Amino acid sequence: MEGDSGRGASEEVLLSGVFRLVPSLKVNCALSLTSGSELLVRRLDSAGRSSNAGSALSLSTCVGCYAFQSRSASKQPAAAYFCVVCYPFKKGWWYRGESRQKVAKTFCVLASQDAEENRHVAETWVRAIRELSAPHLEGGIHGLLPQKCQVMVLLNPRSGAGEALRLFTSQVQPMLAEASIGFHKFVTEKHNHAWDLAREEDMSKWDAMVIMAGDGLLHEVINGLMERPDWKTAIQKPLCILPGGSGNALAASLNHYASKSHVAKEELLMNCTYFLCKGLHAPMDLVSLRTASGKRLFSFLSFGWGFVSDVDITSERYRKLGSARFTVGTFQLLTSLQVYKGRLSYLPAEVQSSASNSLPPIGVNTSPSPQHPHQVSTAVHTLPQSASSLLKEDSVLEDSLLVPFEQPVPKHWTVVPEEEFVSIVGIQQSHLGTDFIIAPTAKLFDDAIHLFYVTAGISRMGMLRLFMAVEKGSQLTLNQPHVHCVPVKAFRLEPLEPKGFMTVDGEVLTCEPVQGQIHHRLARIISGS
């Protein structure tokens, strides 16, 4: 292979050629494709000399490359074309940080009067560019969607400010076309519609499930998948969140994990759509939650009780404000800070349970039956008879760290001595909203619930400082004695009075005793790293 001078001189040139730049067709460009996954573009003068240092497209930001024939039979009928679409970070004058901006370049191949030969050259470049732009898989942890994949899109037109459908059409759909991703869109019409679709849909038709809404719709999808007879396979179907709600906690977390600067609104949507176009998916931990009344839910985000949950639910009336509704709700509730009485216990993440194997796990053997009507249920909602009859006992996911509510927590658990709290949050992700960083060190599959709780005695000013720090993820540097954060494997919360809202992934839960444990790498999510 020939060498290259200037930029990329130390890298091997895999392909090189001279093509005309579209749309003018009057400018010739020398293209070099390097082993460093760069496409070097240099404009040539009339004598065929490079007139400048040229520019480079990093193929790590390329979402699509495709070839096509001449659009007009009257102009260059033998010509073929190939187009490269990238989304590099650029600093815009309207925004302090960097955001992804589309860069598309189309080149005309007219090396021969033979249309077939020109098409072959264009397709050779397309194959090479696609190969170099594919994310690198390391360690067997990540996976990659197939090229020209088909995805199922679930969209809630009423989530957040009600802009999801417009944003999907104007921003997401064009990017999917650039990445050659086919889709079928389902617009949800009622509460738990996505739950039913996820439980009943033929998953073999789709390479991934895309949720264009807030976090609540993904909660429905995950729990629908976990109710299927084939849940072990179904929950491994890659999921994708495109922020269309007001909280958008998982989308903000994924952006954070990819080491990208803080963005919100349409910039965050572009980043998450970019992740989908690149097709990289990673494992994601889920938490199995059980209530004393027999309900079972699976959570990808958080469980909460107290101040944070009350803000989330009571601010729903301001959903048209987008993420600003949480700020409004916070100031409203700070005027009358409430205390919630309960018992909190947990299994610290660093504690290895020597007795875990001897404990009877909640799962198969504790499923309800006519003979044992008071035992804990493993189902979230009552399944249709056809689905329930297909579930076999040995297919139920066991909670090996939990014991029935009528039993005390194991001796190696920690029991919090205080019984008066202002707020309790168990979170698996870094963010609880686009501007709400509860657990800045959390990861997608770190095998831990980050238990964040605030005990009674904190002042209103202390809570205000805390929430200002949470916007930056610096709350643990406050040295506030009432604020605690500990990574745990499991927890149990027993309210001593039915006060305030309990939430799971932002959805309301009846205030009652609840316990949960982490399940490592149970699901898969489209991510940036």
Image: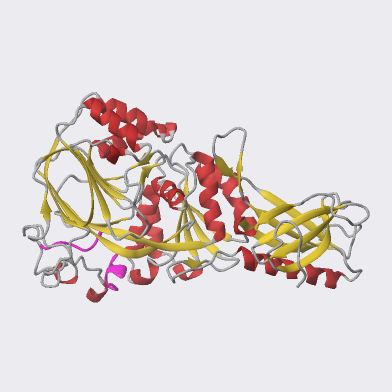
Magenta part, dominant SS:
loop
Query: Which part of the image, by quadrant, shows the N terminus?
Result: bottom right
Residue 433 sits in quarter? top left
Quick check: 258 left or right of 112? left
- Residue 343, compared with residue 478, is above or below; it is below
- Residue 73: x percent and y percent? 89, 60
State the residue in front, 230 or 446: 446
State the residue in front, 403 or 7: 7
Q: Which of the colour schemes (rainbow, by chain, secondary structure, one colour) is used?
A: secondary structure
Residue 342 sits in quarter? top left
- Residue 450: x percent and y percent? 27, 51
Residue at figure coordinates x 88%, y 67% from the top left: 111
Quick check: 255 left or right of 93? left
- Residue 135: x percent and y percent? 55, 64
Residue at figure coordinates x 47%, y 71% from the top left: 204
Q: How many numbered marks have been drawn onto this rendered protein structure?
A: 0
- Residue 156, compared with residue 385, is above or below; it is above
- Residue 200, compared with residue 307, is above or below; it is below
Quick check: 128 left or right of 391? right
Residue 402 sits in quarter? bottom left
| Direction top: furthest residue | 335
Q: Which residues are magenta?
A: 375-391
Instruction: Based on the picture, tell me whether residue 388 belongs to the magenta stretch.
Output: yes
Residue at figure coordinates x 38%, y 38% from the top left: 472
Instruction: Based on the picture, tell me whether residue 503 belongs to the magenta stretch.
Output: no
Is residue 440 in view? yes
Is residue 383 in view? no
- Residue 244: x percent and y percent? 47, 44
State the residue in front, 302 or 87: 87
